[in-house]
Amino acid sequence: MLTFALIALTVLGLLTFWLHRRLVAAPRWSTRWRYAGSALIVALTALAVVAAAGGLRWGTADDTRPVAWAALTWLVVAMYLVFVLAAGQVVAAVVWLATHRDRRRGVLARFNRIVAAVALVAALGTTAYGLFEARDPVITPTTHTSAALPAGFDGTTVALVTDLHAGVVHGSDFATKVVDRVNAAKPDIVVLSGDVVDAPFERHRAEIAPLADLEAPLGVFAVTGNHEMYTGSTAEWVAEWDRLGITVLANASQTLTVGGESIRIAGIHDREGTGEFAPDPGRALAGTEDGFTLYLAHQPVMASESGDRGVDLQLSGHTHGGQVWPGQLIVPLQQPMVEGYAVVDGVPVITSRGAGTWGPPVRVAAPPQIPLITLRRG
């Protein structure tokens, strides 16, 4: 984790310097604007790093949320600025070659100003769209058919809620919105498939209080995700879920019964867990081989550890569907699927894009969702 953080900080520092060069220095703005632009870029990047590390600690979480929101959103603006400015550099090379050497300095300065303006408009416009897209998770119906499903469970609905990331950016108002959407869909089962929280327990406990209002006649169940492990408060969060009336499947399973027929719902800790929170698929799926089994595992790649254990459907999140384009192209480097339905090592898996966001409250080409899965016998 430390190595990853150092690499990320180094890359971010280099990109910040490059943005300063291409967005502020190269266009040769007036001295006043160059100083102001450089100061703004450095300040926003520094705030984003502090916010991502949970270091905004003055006042309450609600006091720091607007600052975290703005600073983390800047990371998406900066990314798209880099894309457009890099493309502009390619064109600038052509302009340089096509211009007489005596005029190159002035022509390139004017060209760089045009590119900087286009980059700002494109980056701000795309990010604004992404902010709008991320704010409203919607119910997305889907169906899973299995011959192993008992007749009494035919038509059972499961709401898959994942990746709320309650904490620094997403407060209790966002959790309330998700709860209202889920309850309006009237699911029989609600599952929280990890990354419910994304911040230390002692400061952000109130953010998930609305989850106590989730309603499902067959139960509300949860498993940990990698970000529960990163909070440093894993035990406290798991205990809080239990206090809110959520059944935590900690490498365990439970039997659900309707009209004398039964299925099993099992869950496993995230693969980032250690010690008492280390994943144990053998224990989670013990005794589930003979009947229909729903399996909660935060990361879709975890299906590779349960391919011969009788799992009928794994429910996952983690990928965010890429969250911000071109993240969709990067997810396959770590996971066997980006979103939707796939069979992974013989296990049917439904992976949600998630309801919330990690880091920036932005989604581009990966709208938030709450899958509502209807189980069918067939």
Image (tube, helix red, strand yellow):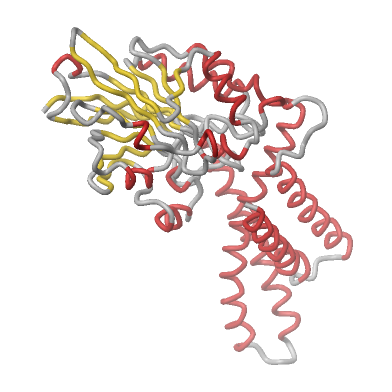
Q: Residue furthest top?
A: 259
Q: Position of residue 83 (x, y in %)?
A: 57, 63
Q: Quadrant of residue 106?
A: bottom right
Front-most of residues 140 and 132: 140
Q: Residue furthest right?
A: 32
Query: Residue sitting at 45 percent across and 29 percent down?
Result: 223
Q: Position of residue 182 (x, y in %)?
A: 42, 19
Q: Is 83 above or below relative to 105?
A: above
In the picture, which quadrant includes the C terminus? top left
Q: Position of residue 150 (x, y in %)?
A: 15, 20
Q: Quadrant of residue 97?
A: bottom right
Front-most of residues 80 and 48: 48
Query: Residue sitting at 65 percent across and 50 percent down?
Result: 75
Front-most of residues 310 and 172: 310
Q: Position of residue 214 (x, y in %)?
A: 46, 14
Q: Total marks drawn?
A: 0
Q: Is 23 above or below relative to 176?
A: below
Q: Residue furthest bottom?
A: 101
Query: Residue sitting at 75 percent across and 64 percent down?
Result: 20
Q: Is 151 above or below relative to 291?
A: above
Query: Residue sitting at 71 percent across and 25 percent down?
Result: 202
- Specify whether 339 is left or right of 263: right
